[in-house]
Image (tube, rainbow, N blue to C red):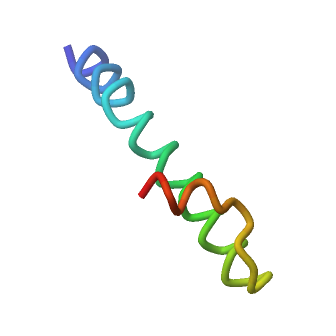
Amino acid sequence: MMISIFTLSLIAFAPVVSLSVVYAVIVVLKVGLGIEVLPFLDSAE
């Protein structure tokens, strides 16, 4: 049963973690380079 709960947790949180990592990388690139790396993401926000 624990394996099933753990698997469901991974399936539920994987997309959130992935988006968080991608967003963090974009923010780091913006701050590190000091330029708008992907301007269309700003308009999406």
Residue 16 point in image, percent of width and height: 39, 42
Residue 35 point in image, percent of width and height: 75, 79
The image quadrant where one finds the C terminus is: bottom left
Residue 6 point in image, percent of width and height: 30, 26
Residue 24 point in image, percent of width and height: 56, 64
- Residue lying furthest right: 33
In the displayed structure, does residue 5 sit left or right of residue 29? Answer: left
Front residue of 37 and 23: 37
The image quadrant where one finds the N terminus is: top left
In the displayed structure, does residue 38 sit left or right of residue 20? Answer: right
Q: Is residue 13 above or below residue 3?
A: below
Q: Residue at x 52, y 43 (%)?
A: 18
In the displayed structure, does residue 29 sit left or right of residue 10? Answer: right
Numbered-mark total: 0
Q: Residue at x 49, y 46 (%)?
A: 19
Q: Residue at x 37, y 24 (%)?
A: 11
Q: Is residue 8 above or below residue 25?
A: above
Q: Quadrant of residue 29?
A: bottom right
Q: Is residue 5 above or below residue 36?
A: above
Q: Residue at x 45, y 46 (%)?
A: 17
Q: Quadrant of residue 15?
A: top left
Front residue of 7 and 24: 24
